[in-house]
């Protein structure tokens, strides 16, 4: 579909440059131990089987914006960025370079999402195939009928609906919320270890920027990492804001993402003359 868009633009605007800004690009700094899977290496050589990661334009934008908010150079910071929306991913960013991210070869891996399951034992898939499900059935199940929607059983994977249903005691919304928080805390803790400590935890995306209860539930589990919630700041947060206490050694901040602006900046960078390209 993206290639079709390029071809259409070439027909409509002949001679005008087209720039492809890949959502995987920011994650290309990962080392082999982070992006390879523990399967025969030939599968990587022959088919490109590896972790690519997604939401790269968002993670890159908020990493830079977080540095500005903290008034520190990006190359001096260790950040854990959490893009939380219908699709969710986390990234460990050391001095401006990604060292790991939660999504994999596809956007199905990692965190619990609106309709995607995130991490799952591959053996479950073998079991379901033996029970009569087809590959297409599994694709639909894991991508469109799982995650918050699948667990909560309220007909929605929207976090706002999950929170309302949890408050009302409807379905399994409370379990869905708890699973979402549990998985996210698990990744934050792992990335904190990979980074050998972090300066800030960044919340972004529709949930990360707007859900006071999600941020509160996550930060409540991070005291061992030096992050403590300032409930008043969290409640009042609009736009870029700190939601942790002043004495937190791991700052928790909210940074609104702007993927469109990041794409525009990347386009300018590619098209600018080599001697005049921005960093």
Image (cartoon, rainbow, N blue to C red):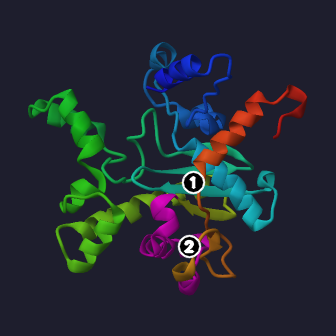
Q: Position of residue 61 (x, y in %)?
A: 65, 50
Instruction: Judge the density around disc 2: few (<14), some (14-19), many (≥20) Cα neighbours within 10 Å.
Output: few
Residue, x 67% and y 41% (percent of image)?
264
Q: Which residue is mark 2?
A: 224
Is residue 59 visible to us here? yes
Residue, x 59% and y 56% (percent of image)?
257
Q: CA distance from mark 1 to mark 2?
A: 14 Å
Examine the structure image and report whether residue 215 is included in the region drawn in magenta: yes
Residue, x 43% and y 70% (percent of image)?
214
Q: Position of residue 37 (x, y in %)?
A: 47, 31
Question: Which numbered disc flags the more N-terminal residue, 1 or 2?
Answer: 1
Would residue 4 appear left or right of 19 to someone viewing this image?
A: left
Q: Which residue is mark 1?
A: 191
Q: Quadrant of residue 142?
A: top left
Q: Residue furthest left?
A: 132
Q: Residue furthest bottom?
A: 232
Examine the structure image and report whether residue 94 is included in the region drawn in magenta: no
Determine whether the residue tagged by mark 2 lies in a helix, strand or loop.
helix
Is residue 178 visible to us here? no
Q: Position of residue 187 (x, y in %)?
A: 49, 55
Viewer-side residue, 8 vs 40: 8
Q: Is the magenta region chiefly helix, strand or loop?
A: helix
Q: Residue furthest top?
A: 46
Disc number at residue 150?
A: none
Q: In the image, which residues are magenta?
A: 205-233
Closer to the eye: label 1 or 2: 1
Instruction: Judge the density around disc 1: few (<14), some (14-19), many (≥20) Cα neighbours within 10 Å.
Output: many
Whether 186 is drawn above or below 226: the answer is above
Whether 19 is drawn above or below 231: the answer is above
Viewer-side residue, 132 vs 277: 277
Tag 1 and tag 2, C-beta contact below 8 Å: no
Q: Quadrant of residue 163?
A: bottom left
């Amino acid at each position: 579909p993206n290639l079709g868009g390029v071809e259409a633009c070439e027909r409509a605007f002949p001679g005008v440059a087209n720039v492809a800004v890949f959502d995987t690009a920011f994650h290309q700094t990962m080392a082999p131990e982070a992006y390879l899977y523990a399967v025969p290496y030939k599968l990587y050589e022959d088919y490109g089987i590896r972790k690519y990661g997604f939401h790269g334009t968002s993670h890159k934008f908020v990493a830079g914006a977080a540095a500005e908010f903290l008034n520190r150079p990006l190359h001096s910071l260790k950040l854990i960025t959490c893009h939380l929306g219908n699709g969710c991913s986390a990234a460990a960013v050391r001095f401006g370079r990604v060292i790991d991210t939660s999504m994999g070869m596809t956007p199905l891996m990692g965190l619990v999402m609106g309709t995607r399951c995130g991490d799952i034992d591959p053996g479950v898939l073998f079991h379901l195939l033996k029970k009569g499900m087809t590959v297409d059935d599994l694709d639909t199940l894991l991508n469109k009928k799982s995650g918050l929607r699948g667990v909560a059983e309220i007909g929605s994977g929207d976090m706002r609906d999950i929170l309302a249903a949890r408050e009302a005691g409807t379905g399994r919304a409370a379990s869905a919320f708890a699973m979402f928080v549990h998985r996210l805390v698990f990744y934050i803790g792992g990335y904190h270890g990979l980074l050998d400590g972090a300066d800030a935890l960044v919340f972004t995306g529709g949930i990360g920027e707007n859900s006071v209860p999600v941020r509160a539930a996550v930060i409540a589990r991070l005291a061992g990492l030096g992050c403590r919630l300032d409930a008043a700041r969290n409640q009042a947060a609009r736009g870029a804001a700190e939601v942790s206490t002043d004495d937190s050694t791991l700052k928790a901040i909210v940074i609104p993402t702007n993927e469109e602006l990041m794409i525009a900046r990347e386009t300018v960078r590619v098209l600018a003359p080599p001697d005049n390209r921005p960093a």
